[in-house]
Image (tube, grey):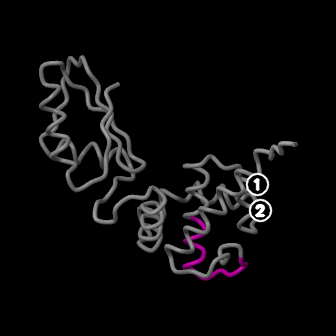
Amino acid sequence: MEIQIYPFKITEELNFKAICSLTTKVMGLPNGSLSLKSRERNLQVARSAAGYIGLTEEDIDRNVIAKVLNRDRTATYHYERTHKKNFKHCIIYRNTFTKIYKEYKNIDGEKDIFINKRQLKNHLLQNKVFEAENSDVSLQVKSGEAICIINTSYFDFSNQIQNIKNAMKNYHFTIDII
């Protein structure tokens, strides 16, 4: 019996096709529509969100993403470069990306996530989470793509964990001690 070993690129291609399938399902688009040459806004936004997730979450090769989307490899640079600006200023992109990303992460739609660390840290500091000047312990709080560090002391450690839990009760998050 001979075992077949597939090249790494095939696995990446299958992974990205799964992301594209998820994207079309979540957005109510026909399966395979992301690879069409159509420039309809809803397809462009979904294509961009899927490409960005493939690049940043799965570290899929740009050539593979371009092949599956039937685009030039340089389009993947555009997806990556414009993500923050589009997320901040374009409500269509923000809603589309958030919807796809939540489903990709299999996150319950009732709870929200943070996209950047500045928003996350500001939210924590506004909700009774304090940082110690002389820190013994660092807590890493992660929500969605955002990761921030809260420095605390051994004496205040358990209080700060409780404060973080209270501040993040309406958000998906994890806390790690680093």
Q: Which residues are magenta?
A: 36-48
Q: Is residue 39 magenta?
A: yes
The C terminus - image quarter: top left
* Quadrant in the rendering for residue 157: top left
Give the residue pinned by disc 2: 67
Left or right placement of residue 145 versus residue 9 in this view: left
Which residue appears farthest toward the right when viewing the image?
A: 2
* Quadrant in the rendering for residue 34: bottom right
Q: Is residue 108 above or below residue 55?
A: below
Residue 151 badge: none
Residue 68 on image: x %, y %: 73, 64
Residue 116 on image: x %, y %: 38, 49
How packed mark 2 is, by other alpha carbons closer than 10 Å (few <14, some 14-19, many 20 or more), is few
Give the residue pinned by disc 1: 63
Is the stretch drawn in magenta largely helix, strand or loop? Answer: helix
Q: Is residue 174 above or below residue 103?
A: above
The N terminus - image quarter: top right
Residue 84 on image: x %, y %: 48, 56
How packed mark 1 is, by other alpha carbons closer than 10 Å (few <14, some 14-19, many 20 or more), is some
For image coordinates 55% across by 49% down, the residue present is 57
Name the kind of residue labelled 2 in the image. Answer: Lys
Who is closer to the viewer here, 118 or 140? Answer: 140
Name the kind of residue labelled 1 in the image. Answer: Asn
SS type, badge 1:
helix
Marks 1/2 in contact by CB < 8 Å: the verdict is: yes
For image coordinates 25% across by 26% down, the residue present is 151
